[in-house]
Amino acid sequence: IREFHTEDAERELAPVRRALDAAGVPYVTHVAVGYAAEEIVKFAQRHHCQRIVMGPAKGGNLSELVLGSLNRQIEQMMRTTGRACEVL
């Protein structure tokens, strides 16, 4: 399952990587498999992030509802850890 999701993530990231490479923009990608809010919070804590920028939801109103909920979950989880982290 992990391999499937990792390959899917790499496929989704490919066009963004091409655009960043063409523009000469340096970047680093990270792929995590698991419950999204938990994985994002663990990453933010490990890397001492002060801000998390979420991309737009794909797929319409339901996706926007889920992404909004994900943003709230991340904010709440970060607050419980005692670390301030802005989620945009």
Image (tube, rainbow, N blue to C red):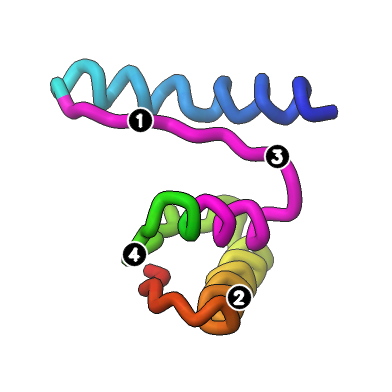
Farthest residue in the right direction? 1
The mark nearer the N terminus, 1 or 4, is 1
Rendered image quadrant of residue 56: bottom left
Q: Residue at x 66, y 67 (%)?
A: 66
Q: CA distance from mark 2 to mark 3?
A: 18 Å
Q: Residue at x 58, y 65 (%)?
A: 67
Q: Nearer the viewer, residue 11 or 41?
A: 41
Disc 4 on helix, strand or loop? strand
The mark nearer the N terminus, 4 or 3, is 3
Q: Nearer the viewer, residue 20 or 81?
A: 81
The mark nearer the N terminus, 2 or 4, is 4
* Vertical arrangement, residue 74 with respect to residue 43, above or below: below
User: For the residue carrying disc 3, how many other residues have a C-alpha within 10 Å: few (<14), some (14-19), or many (20+)?
Assistant: few
Q: Quadrant of the C terminus?
A: bottom left
Residue type marked 2: Met
**Extent of the magenta region:** 25-43
The mark nearer the N terminus, 2 or 1, is 1
Residue type marked 3: Val
* Vertical arrangement, residue 27 with respect to residue 7, above or below: below
Cβ–Cβ under 8 Å for marks 2 and 3: no
Residue type marked 4: Arg
Residue denoted by label 3: 33
Residue denoted by label 1: 28
User: For the residue carrying disc 4, how many other residues have a C-alpha within 10 Å: few (<14), some (14-19), or many (20+)?
Assistant: few
Residue denoted by label 2: 77
Q: CA distance from mark 2 to mark 1?
A: 24 Å
Q: CA distance from mark 2 to mark 4?
A: 14 Å
- Whether 38 is among the magenta residues is yes
- Residue 17 screen position, x and y as percent: 36, 23
Q: CA distance from mark 3 to mark 1?
A: 17 Å
Residue denoted by label 4: 51
Cβ–Cβ under 8 Å for marks 1 and 4: no
